[in-house]
Image: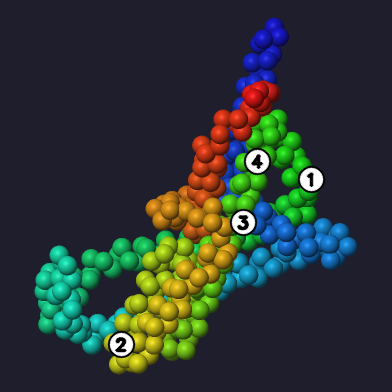
Amino acid sequence: MERIERMVLIAALVLLAIACILVVRPFLSATLWAVILALTTWPLFCRLRDMLGGRSTVAATIMTTGVILVLVVPLALGGIAIANSAEEWIELAKQALDRGVPPPPAWVATVPLAGELLRDRWMVAATDGAAFVRDLKPLAEPAKEWAIAGAKSLGEGVATLFLSALIVFFFWRDGDELSARARRMAQRVAGERALQLAEVAKGTIRGTVYGILGTALAQGALAFVGFLIAGIPGAFLLGVGTFFLSVVPVGPPLIWAPAAFWLYEQGETGWAIALVVWGVAVISSVDNVLKPLLISRGSKLPFILVLLGVLGGVVAFGFVGIFLGPTLLAVAYRLLDEWTGAPPERIIIAGAAPPEG
């Protein structure tokens, strides 16, 4: 009878765990991002709380307001800018089609492997505008679907960030108690070794977020300034795009290079050259100068893991996954490196005594 009761209890606990997972699953990305924000900004919160005489609720409220102003509002403004700039970009595309495609530059033929093919295709587009338009028509519907999906993802990203800002309020306010409970749970599961790995994870999260998010903010702001000075339409929108693409090392040139080419096509050769110089010397160089100062050396990820983190993060968590994916992979990478690199005498199993010398 006692065995049956135990089995019923275990089954009930399993069902309860499954039900809780189903309830929390829609908010998983927001909760994970809230945890990352809380760990990353905890020292700042503690200083603010001390300045306010230990009033955690007031400090948490101020920090939450700051997160909304720094992260949520710019993303929402970016969505508004997309909506406002859509008609302008469509008109520019129509004007470009009306003017036709210019002849290909001489360097196109020198591109390895595909140079001749690119030159021939470009020449056909330049000499036969109708054929060029016909070639673009099959891409219209996929482009429309991609734009709708992007707008939906952006809206979900704003909602996720706003929800995470509300969740992180409670992590800040009750952080001391939550940290103590997490430490006791970790000790019961894996002993002192769990605390050591928890410190590694915390340091990795802070270093990765400082490096990725700090660099992204700097590159996005510098790109916006360059686009604004050069007189490119939708400068704020392009700056937001640079912010998100800065996670990938080759991301920012995907924004400023086409913008410079557009300036060249408009006859603004001087501004085009200036934008290229600004992109290479300032925007892209931030990744090599600022990131090493912000991110800890041990938290650096191989490029392939950064790329997988960005792509997989977007698929799994939506827009927020651009930063959430690389951060999670960085933690897993460092924990695995710490665990496999530890000598046998450092590995302590819960409930077991360390080996005698």
Query: At numbered mark 1, what does the secondary structure look like: helix, strand or loop?
Result: helix
In front of the other: 67 or 112: 112
- Identify the disc placed on residue 276: none
In the figure, is residue 116 to the left or right of 303?
left
First in sequence: mark 4 vs mark 2: 4
Looking at the rendered structure, the number of numbered marks drawn on it comes to: 4
- Identify the disc placed on residue 196: 4
Q: CA distance from mark 3 to mark 4?
A: 16 Å
Q: Where does label 2 land, which residue? A: 264
Query: In the image, which is nearer the foreground, mark 4 or mark 2?
Result: 4
Kind of residue at disc 2? Tyr
In front of the other: 16 or 330: 330
Kind of residue at disc 4? Gln
Query: At numbered mark 4, what does the secondary structure look like: helix, strand or loop?
Result: helix
Mark 2 neighbour class, 10 Å CA radius: few under 14, some 14 to 19, many 20 or more: some
Query: In the image, which is nearer the foreground, mark 3 or mark 4?
Result: 4
Query: At numbered mark 3, what does the secondary structure look like: helix, strand or loop?
Result: helix
- Tags 3 and 4 in contact by the CB under 8 Å rule? no
Question: In x, y percent, where is residue 246?
Answer: 46, 67
Q: Where does label 1 land, which residue? A: 177
Q: CA distance from mark 2 to mark 3?
A: 41 Å
First in sequence: mark 1 vs mark 3: 1
Kind of residue at disc 1? Glu
Q: CA distance from mark 1 to mark 3?
A: 20 Å
In front of the other: 69 or 95: 69
Q: Where does label 3 land, which residue? A: 206
Question: In x, y percent, where is residue 319?
Answer: 49, 59
First in sequence: mark 1 vs mark 4: 1
Q: CA distance from mark 1 to mark 2?
A: 59 Å
Q: Quadrant of residue 347?
A: top right
